[in-house]
Every structure is written in structure tokens, then in C-alpha cells.
Image: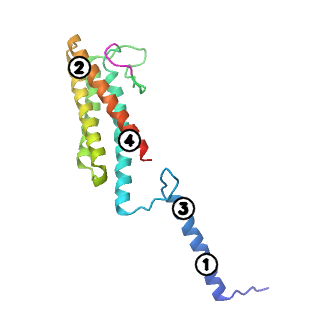
Amino acid sequence: MIITVNKKILIIGVIVVLTVAILAIGLAVTPFDKAGNAVLLTTGNRQIKAYLDNARAWRQTLDETRGQLLSLVPAAVTPQPTVELWEPAPAGGAPLSVYEQNRIATAVVNRLVEVNTQVDRATVPQALQGTHAMVRQAVQDHLQLANLILDYVGAPDEAKVPGIQSQAEMCQQDTTRLRELLDEGK
């Protein structure tokens, strides 16, 4: 038994299947705003989305590096963290040597410098200039915290503690403001 299909019906069927497939793919990859409305990804909107994604990654890195830096100083020096601190102590709970602390601190500072470079080189949409200024300030504050902690680790002195605590609180406030601002844009 041979089934014959009219060429015109076959073409219409293929077009319908392709149209449904394209619509399904488009629906799957379309971003939506808070109200659930589809957002047209024009060039400008795509740049904004890319920048906000980068800013969220930078904020996450700042949180992680702050935790790593604060774990290098005694708990009495650090303010109450709102993020879980990274614990650099080796197995057995032995304190880290100055060499190990320096190695960890150097890696963290290098990571902060890398983020600073990315922020400086980022293409910033005009609408996000204020957000970019906040991101830049947060990175600078974290670099300042790193310098204060490196100074403390190299030569512990109780006179340095208030400066570290003040800078750590400022860094915490910076990333909290960024988290609130960036989560608002989701």
C-alpha cells in the first residue's frame, strides 16, 4: 500500500512543524521581567543583561574574598559576618604560618585585582553608570581591606584592629547594597 501526500500539504505541514519548533525555542530562551512580561533583547537590553550578570558575579567574588581575608585575622578582630567565612586552617586545626597566610592573602589580592581590572574594562550601559560607580567603590573598599589585613598579618598590632573592623563593615555594607540593587533587577 502506497500513501501519497499532496506536495502542497507536505510543505504546509513542514512549515507548521518548523514554526512551532521556533516558537518553542524562542519561548524557552526569552527572558522575563518581574511582572512576567517578555523582554525584547535588543542590543541595549542585551548589554544591560550582560553587565548585570557580570556585576552579580563580581559581588559574589567580593563576598568570597572578604570571607577569605577575614579568616586570616583572629575572630576578635572581625565583625560579625553575614556570609560564611572560608576556613583556611589546615587539618587538625593548627594555626597557619605567616608563609601560608601570605600565600592565601596574595591569591586573594590577585583575585581582587583581577576583578578590579574586569570592572575597569567593562562596557557599561548608560543606564547603569550609577550601578557601575557602586561596583567600583565596593572593589576599591575590598582592596583597601586587603591592604589593612596584609599589614596586620605582617605585623599584628591592636591599634590596627579598629581600622580593619571599620573597613570590613564598610565592605559588608557595599556588597549588601549591591545584592539588594542587583536582585531588584532580576
From the image, state whether disc 3 or disc 4 is nearer to you: 4
Q: Which mark is residue 181?
A: 4
Q: Tag 4's secondary structure?
A: helix
Q: Residue at x 35, y 15 (%)?
A: 75
Q: Which mark is residue 163?
A: 2
Q: Mark 3 Cα within 10 Å, few/some/many (few <14, many 20+)?
A: few
Query: Does residue 58 sit above or below 77 in this rendering?
Result: below
Alpha carbons under labels 4 and 1: distance apart: 46 Å
Q: Tag 2's secondary structure?
A: helix
For the record, the magenta segment spans: 76-80
Alpha carbons under labels 3 and 4: distance apart: 27 Å
Q: What kind of secondary structure does the magenta stretch mostly adopt? A: loop
Q: Mark 4 Cα within 10 Å, few/some/many (few <14, many 20+)?
A: some
Q: x, y percentage for residue 51?
A: 34, 50
Q: Quadrant of residue 135?
A: top left
Q: Quadrant of residue 73?
A: top left
User: Is 39 in the magenta?
Assistant: no
